[in-house]
Image (spheres, rainbow, N blue to C red):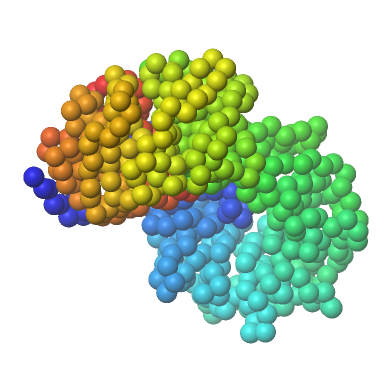
Amino acid sequence: METQASPKDEVAEAVELELEAVIGFNGHVPTGLKCHPDQEHLVYPLGCTILIQAINTQEQNFLHGHGNNVSCVAISKSGLYIASGQVTFMGFKADIILWDYKKRELMARLSLHKGKIEALAFSPNDMYLVSLGGPDDGSVVVWSIAKREAICGSPAAGLNVGNATTVIFSKCRDEMFVTAGNGTIRVWELDLPNRKIWPTECQTGQMKRIVMSISMANDDSFFYLGTTTGDILKMNPRTKLLADTGPAKDKFSLGVSAICCLKMGGLLVGSGDGLLVFCKSPSYKPIKKIQLQGGITSITLRGEGHQFFVGTEESHIYRVNFTNFKETLITTCHFESVEDIVFPFGTAELFATCAKKDIRVWHTLTNRELLRITVPNMTCHGIDFMRDGKSIISAWDDGRIRAFAPETGRLMYVINNAHRIGVTAIATTSDCKRVISGGGEGEVRVWHIGHQTQKLEEALKEHKSSVSCIRVKKSNEECVTASTDGTCIIWDLVRLRRNQMILANTLFQCVCYHPEEFQIITSGTDRKVRVGTFLDGSATMPYNCLSVSGGNDHLVKVWDYNEGEVTHVGVGHSGNITRIRISPGNQYIVSVSADGAILRWKYPFPS
């Protein structure tokens, strides 16, 4: 029996899956982390979504509307509006979306730039929005917020210099803004009656710099530019001349990637190697400093700056009190592709994920990271909890199986040389006596786990390519393995030999047993979900996960098992979905993706 539905029909007829929470923050967006003027909420991007998170209660709201990754975010001075820009494919128009903050809804979609929106800025009285196009576009456009249309535009930089990458509005006047980038610093004046913007190039003499970050003093007396060289330029917007530059020695390593003026005078400076510094012109020598994890991309003030938030490339959000200058980590998430997710047996309170060098344990309801286990310079491909909850078994690309204590992260034991070309999949039996592993060379190995010893019982050589998924039957007498060679094999774990083989013209990514264990369900790169007797559910892209399915179309789909039809669709991911799990007790669906995001969905049926 086959069901062939067009993807558009499937999604149109299906009910939307309710998104409960997101663990994720794209730390690579310059100045992407913003503290709202109400001082109660943080606004930041994750993939195609903008998150509004309450600082005290952690409650989340989501702004969905972009068709591709968000590249910049701006909030108006009054806090009424949020503007966000996105990247898109070359030659296509990239949207700017204007959001109503109070209603949490889309007000207008502004389309003019091509390829990418590099930066956005609101005028001080919410009259205008200025936008900067990416390298393929190269133009600067001023928009009227009231009319929601473009007033005028111009090429952002001269012919003999590089692209402009940052923009900032005057703090006092609605008619003046500054753009800066590779070898260009321009002060612009808006001439509204003639619908023109007039640029004046700033003079820096012999000094040639690439600007990474920009900040304006509260009284418009000066603006400060952070450069890739690791120094700071102080410019006068009236005379368009360089006032001073520094530090002369001990420049900021990997550039000044974030800069912020304080009302009381002085600057907060963030560097590309994670150093946060408070300094003053003209020496720019550190008065206070702390080292954070990951290059700093955002510094945003809460109110006058008595407290501020810092975002880094490693997707950490820190809260810092200015007086004692001590950091508190308030949000963290994976910044690499998440390879696996698993719940402990019988509880939905916790779950574990792995990505690149990290294994992290999360508290489900609060989205809080409880434990982080790091193995430097390695990649973890899969994890599983032992049934008794006393260890996390993990598969690594150096060919080792490592077991960690789930409460402390202590390394309990290592099985060296478990596989030749890395361990690619792992599973455990419910009696906690066996671990079954799959390798990049295609072998399936059964290990006996004793109190002090780990012994190889059997190496099962049938697959010709890497093993992508392993599932064990409740009785522990049988397991099924999926491989990218296009075979799924059911193994007898008592006699340690092959029972049955399924062949298909696909790279199998995932396999699981039906709850009654009389059928197996597989999925692979041929965009089909196969159920035992090969019921085909065609979808738009390759599928990587099962029960509920998700794949390279970034959609989470819930299927009616008997009818083979999509009943619910979850929109929220912006990367390819790599794994999905339904929690024990059927309360949640948790999906993870290649952009490092973890999304928790409400299970759509009564549990």
Is residue 510 in sight in this rendering? no
Q: Residue furthest bottom?
A: 159
Residue at the (40%, 60%) spot, across then down: 109
Residue 487 appears at what percent x and percent y? 28, 46
Viewer-proximal residue among 115 and 445? 445
Viewer-proximal residue among 135 and 236? 135
Could you tell whether 459 is left or right of 421 in the image?
A: left
Residue 59 appears at what percent x and percent y? 48, 31
Quadrant in the picture for the N terminus: top left
Residue at the (13%, 52%) spot, across then down: 4
Residue at the (29%, 19%) spot, across then down: 475
Quadrant in the picture for the C terminus: top left
Viewer-proximal residue among 465 and 75? 465
Q: Toward which corner of the image does residue 123 lie, by quadrant?
A: bottom right
Q: Up-down: is 425 above or below 274?
A: above
Could you tell whether 347 is left or right of 561 in the image?
A: right
Residue 522 appears at what percent x and percent y? 26, 41
Residue 193 appears at what percent x and percent y? 54, 76
Residue at the (84%, 78%) spot, across then down: 206
Could you tell whether 307 is left or right of 466 in the image?
A: right
